[in-house]
Image: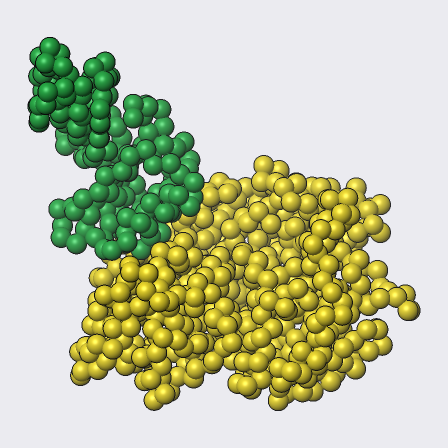
């Protein structure tokens, strides 16, 4: 999950929280041949709405099509494209790592350096968690892999625009009202 | 007022001013068929659910009102998938109601259960599974609102049996409540005023302009506005397969159909233009040919109510999201303003003379048959056209006969041409013609069909006979899947694979008569006119005329799939002049 540098776009999609809405969004991606890099969904601040954070792997022109097609879904209320440089991103990683009693201290130390948590300790393995920027999780994962990863689960990223400048939220203008030049 | 979900459903349809439902009952939808007995709504009982869907489409196309189909769950719902997709591709407003197993049985693989909303998700503009009877009026209102506004399309309401049986308190949501319930649905109808002015400027500055009119003109009821615009600036109009009739073929500015089987003038005029004024069309691959070679020098004005069409295929210079009628009227005003301000239109005289040269040299044409030779399908169409009562609605299936219909008919009025453009659904014509005749009983409705298409949905002629819907069907019968045969002849070294249909079986005349229609067979040119006269004189039952036509006849011109429109294939007798297409 480390290759997200070049064509990675984060879409924050506000949807009506109704049965099947996630299926509509994901099947639209499948049908139009777009790739989802990661996806996270949970209820949003307003009751009745959910926010879906989708990391899309595309060139910029198809991204315009992605957002326009998403807008055609009746339950999609708002789409914001978040610039990775101007948004805060977080992800959660859980990993069970092979660790003999002799190695255990090293893994714990590694977790401490990254400000992770020890969730469970067994005789031959240890389960750790880390939340943070996806890049940091990538580094942690790489270092853990030296010990032998038994199981690993990452949550997919969630993101919000940085607060300091209003301009940093580049809301994808609702194309229904977007008659300005495309591109 | 307390009532059952079934009663609420039918009442809601009445409130939506539904006059006709095309459908077929079954287990799960049964409760809804009981209150239908007491309703003012006419129900037309089809013989196959696909027929109900295409009838609803034909009805919607000619009336402009949403077509309604109602069927049961499971196989009935899956049979409805093709018409839904067809309506979605061609932006036809349609509301489909399907039965569903009871809410407690959903997900248990119950008898006649299928995941209807899942299956139809990508074939509808929107769909909804209703979980309580109380929700029905709102869901019905939403379905009609979504189907008929913005870019029209099909919607589906999936209603479990217990939702139909349970009781609810009747209410009828206001427009405001409907809008509030759909916070993400706000179609924009007004174009951007700056872009409209920019479009007007480009139009006046263009030396080689073409109006590229699509089906959106008809959806927006914009035919009059289109005509006013074309005449105001004296610009030629091409009408796509979906827009035939949106601009009269008899008008001197009409160039007819462009695209894969468009006429050479329409194709070339688009290719060579310096400005394409796209009004409600979508740069379909059948129009553009190889996209990188399409109209290379043209700037693009693209008017479309669907923002996702802007830049999907060809990047517009001036994108305008809005209702075609409104936007065209605004462009007309902007042009008048610019002219009043002293701006003069560029000289288009050279361009016009090139166009008229092409028209003279490259009319759509065929070689008439010599005496004793097989009947030509184009000849049959010309005779049908010339004998058709005014206002006749033409409905076609998909294939060679569809292309010849578009090429050889003369469409002078909007909403007189119904066909399956985007999805290309064989078997479309008979049920769609029935729906069209129900919608416009005052009009003569001719279905032009192929023998392949006819065999896919002919059973609906039973519906037409029993319900007394006197449509007329002309089968251009070449005993082949003709379009596939044409491709095999041209691109597969005449290796004919699985395209030959039996010339003996079925006996179309007997089949027609078995279905309660009048059946007529025509083998020679002399028999054509008498058969058409007889068919036109019958008004109490459907008529089927089986024209036995030359199987070797091909549709020309043709742009082979994936090739540039510059490489249009002309009929042999025009090839020698092709250098004139410059």
Is B78 left or right of B163, judged from the image as shown? right
Q: Which residue occupies 14% across, 14% down?
A: A100
Q: Position of residue B561 (x, y in %)?
A: 65, 45
Is B270 left or right of A149, judged from the image as shown? right
Q: Position of residue B294 (x, y in %)?
A: 61, 41
Tally of numbered discs: 0
Q: Which residue occupies 25% across, 73% down?
A: B162
Whether residue B551 is visible: yes
Is B563 or B356 nearer to us in this picture?
A: B563
Is A58 or B457 nearer to us in this picture?
A: B457
User: Does residue B347 lie above or below B190 as drawn?
Assistant: above
Q: Position of residue B304 (x, y in %)?
A: 45, 53
Q: Which chain is green?
A: A
> Dividing the image into 4 quarters, which one contains the N terminus of chain A?
top left
Whether residue B412 is visible: no
Is B100 or B265 nearer to us in this picture?
A: B100
- The quadrant in which residue B578 appears is top right
- The quadrant in which residue B404 appears is bottom right
Is B541 or B187 nearer to us in this picture?
A: B541
Q: Which residue occupies 20% across, 72% down?
A: B134
User: Does residue B13 lie above or below B562 as drawn?
Assistant: below
Q: Which residue occupies 51% across, 51% down?
A: B282
User: Does residue B35 lie above or below A25 as drawn?
Assistant: below
Which color was chain B given?
yellow
């Amino acid at each position: 999950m480390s290759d997200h540098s070049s064509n990675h776009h984060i879409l924050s999609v506000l949807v009506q929280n109704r049965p099947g809405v996630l299926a509509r969004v994901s099947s639209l991606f499948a049908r139009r041949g777009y790739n989802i890099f990661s996806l996270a969904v949970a209820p949003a601040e307003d009751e009745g709405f959910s926010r879906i954070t989708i990391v899309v792997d595309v060139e910029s022109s198809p991204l315009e099509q992605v957002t326009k097609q998403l807008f055609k879904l009746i339950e999609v209320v708002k789409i914001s494209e978040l610039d990775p440089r101007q948004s805060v991103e977080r992800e959660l990683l859980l990993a069970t790592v092979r660790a003999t009693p002799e190695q255990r201290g090293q893994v714990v130390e590694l977790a401490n350096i990254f400000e992770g948590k020890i969730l469970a300790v067994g005789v031959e393995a240890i389960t750790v968690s880390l939340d943070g920027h996806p890049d940091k999780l990538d580094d942690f994962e790489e270092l853990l892999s030296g010990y032998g990863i038994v199981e690993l689960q990452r949550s997919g990223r969630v993101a919000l625009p940085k607060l300091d400048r209003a301009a940093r939220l580049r809301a994808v203008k609702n194309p229904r009202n977007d008659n300005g030049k495309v591109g | 007022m307390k009532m059952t979900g079934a009663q609420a459903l039918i009442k809601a349809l009445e409130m939506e001013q539904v006059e006709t439902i095309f459908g077929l009952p079954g287990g799960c939808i049964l409760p809804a068929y009981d209150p239908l007995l007491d309703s003012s709504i006419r129900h037309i009982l089809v013989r196959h659910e696909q027929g109900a869907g295409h009838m609803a489409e034909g009805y919607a196309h000619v009336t402009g009102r949403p077509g309604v189909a109602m069927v049961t769950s499971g196989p009935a719902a899956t049979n409805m998938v093709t018409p839904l997709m067809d309506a979605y591709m061609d932006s036809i407003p349609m509301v489909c109601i399907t039965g569903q197993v009871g809410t407690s049985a959903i997900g248990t693989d119950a008898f006649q259960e299928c995941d209807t909303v899942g299956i139809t998700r990508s074939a509808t503009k929107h769909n909804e599974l209703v979980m309580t009877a109380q929700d029905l009026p709102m869901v019905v209102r939403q379905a009609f609102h979504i189907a008929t506004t913005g870019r029209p399309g099909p919607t589906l309401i999936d209603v479990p049996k217990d939702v139909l049986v349970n009781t609810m308190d009747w209410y009828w949501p206001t427009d405001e409540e409907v809008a509030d319930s759909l916070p993400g649905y706000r179609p924009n109808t007004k174009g951007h005023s700056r872009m409209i002015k920019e479009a007007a400027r480009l139009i006046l500055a263009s030396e080689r302009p073409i109006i590229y009119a699509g089906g959106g003109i008809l959806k927006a009821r914009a035919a009059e506005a289109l005509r006013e615009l074309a005449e105001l600036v004296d610009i030629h109009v091409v009408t796509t397969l979906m827009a035939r009739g949106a601009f009269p073929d008899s008008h001197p500015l009409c160039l007819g159909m462009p695209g894969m089987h468009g006429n050479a003038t329409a194709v070339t005029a688009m290719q060579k233009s310096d400005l394409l004024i796209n009004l409600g069309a979508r740069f379909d691959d059948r129009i553009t040919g190889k996209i990188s070679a399409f109209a290379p020098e043209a700037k693009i004005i693209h008017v479309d109510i669907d923002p996702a069409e802007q830049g999907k295929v060809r990047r517009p210079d001036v994108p305008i999201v809005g209702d075609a009628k409104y936007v065209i009227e605004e462009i007309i005003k902007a042009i008048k303003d610019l002219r009043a301000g002293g701006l003069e239109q560029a000289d288009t005289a050279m361009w016009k003379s090139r166009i008229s040269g092409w028209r003279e040299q490259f009319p759509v044409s065929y070689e008439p048959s010599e005496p004793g030779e097989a009947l030509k399908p184009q000849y049959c169409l010309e005779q049908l056209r010339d004998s058709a009562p005014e206002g006749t609605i033409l409905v076609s299936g998909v294939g060679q006969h569809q292309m010849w219909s578009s090429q050889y008919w003369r469409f002078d009025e909007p909403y007189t041409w119904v066909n399956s453009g985007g999805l290309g659904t064989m078997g479309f014509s008979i049920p769609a013609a029935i729906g069209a005749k129900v919608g416009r009983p005052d009009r003569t409705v001719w279905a032009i069909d192929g023998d392949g298409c006819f065999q896919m949905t002919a059973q609906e002629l039973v519906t037409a006979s029993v319900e007394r819907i006197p449509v007329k069907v002309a089968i251009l019968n070449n005993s082949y899947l003709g379009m596939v045969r044409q491709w095999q002849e041209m691109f597969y070294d005449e290796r004919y694979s699985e395209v030959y249909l039996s010339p003996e079986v079925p006996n179309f005349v007997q089949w027609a008569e078995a279905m309660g229609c009048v059946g007529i067979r025509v083998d020679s040119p002399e028999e054509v006119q008498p058969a058409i006269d007889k068919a036109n004189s019958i008004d109490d039952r459907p008529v089927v005329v089986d024209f036995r036509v030359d199987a070797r006849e091909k549709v020309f011109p043709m742009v082979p799939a994936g090739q540039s429109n510059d490489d249009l294939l002309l009929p042999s007798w025009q090839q020698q002049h092709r250098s004139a297409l410059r």
